[in-house]
Amino acid sequence: MPIHSEVNYDGRRRLLLLDTTILSARAKISPPAGLRYWLEDVAEIAYLCVCFPVLIEIKRGLHMTRDPATAARVRKVIEDIEQSDFLYLALGRDTEDIFAAMLATPALKRFWYADPKAKHQRVSNDLTIAAMAITYDALIITADGDFKDIHRYFDLPGVYNPIREEWVVEPPEPIELPRLRPEAPTP
């Protein structure tokens, strides 16, 4: 599997940690216009990264779906990730310490407890993803607004929503990301 498990980079290119919402959006029947091309464009200027909790959420969705067409699209996204040059950010002691502090922050308890009254049980790994982003100084690429809430208590290195083309959390050092474009790149 070509996913690189070690993060050795020169520091000139930023790490962009893809959240589940972005990978799930790619698996939709009608993914957001231009998202695929945006990911290709951004891979030219930064390292795309995935991590354990994101892959677990994607694979959980695969196991839960009853629709063969959805399962095929999700399998394709997983296959694309596994055959890509994405960096795989590993869990470690630094992440453990940050994650433990997040779990001890009462204002973030909605991320640790499932709502037993909810129709669809959502497993949130956003705290783990945020802790990993802090550990690796990786910008989070997401369509999820929850990271803004986490940022109130833990400084995230940056959070970008490519579908809305907006910074949810501005990075301390600016980075110019490509625009979302619906058309295919010209050869």
Image: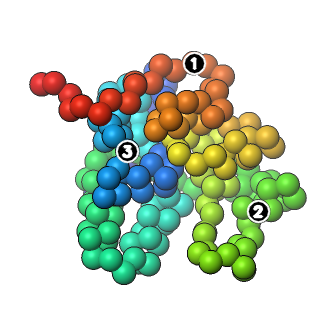
Separation (CA) of disc 2 from disc 1: 31 Å
Determine the secondary structure under disc 1.
loop
Residue at horizontal 67 percent and vertical 55 percent from the top: 127
The image quadrant where one finds the N terminus is: bottom left
Q: Quadrant of residue 40?
A: top left
Residue at horizontal 24 percent and vertical 31 percent from the top: 183
Mark 2 packing: few (<14 Cα in 10 Å), some, or many (20+)?
Answer: few
Mark 2: which amino acid? Arg
Instruction: For residue 155, say whether it is visible.
Output: yes
Determine the secondary structure under disc 3.
loop
**Residue that mark 1 sits on:** 174
**170, 85: nearer the viewer:** 170
Left or right: 163 as drawn, with respect to 109 = left
Residue at horizontal 39 percent and vertical 72 percent from the top: 62
Left or right: 158 as drawn, with respect to 153 = left
**Residue that mark 2 sits on:** 110
Determine the secondary structure under disc 2.
helix
Q: In this view, does 67 lie above or below 143?
A: below
Q: Position of residue 43 (x, y in %)?
A: 35, 33
| Labels 3 and 2: the sequence-earlier one | 3
**Residue that mark 3 sits on:** 32
Closest to the camera, between mark 2 and mark 1, is: 2
Left or right: 119 as drawn, with respect to 60 = right
Closest to the camera, between mark 1 and mark 3, is: 3
Mark 3: which amino acid? Pro
The image quadrant where one finds the C terminus is: top left
Closest to the camera, between mark 3 and mark 2, is: 3
Q: Where is residue 139 in the image (x, y as percent from the top left)?
A: 56, 36
Q: Is residue 11 above or below residue 51?
A: above
Q: Where is residue 73 in the image (x, y as percent from the top left)?
A: 28, 63
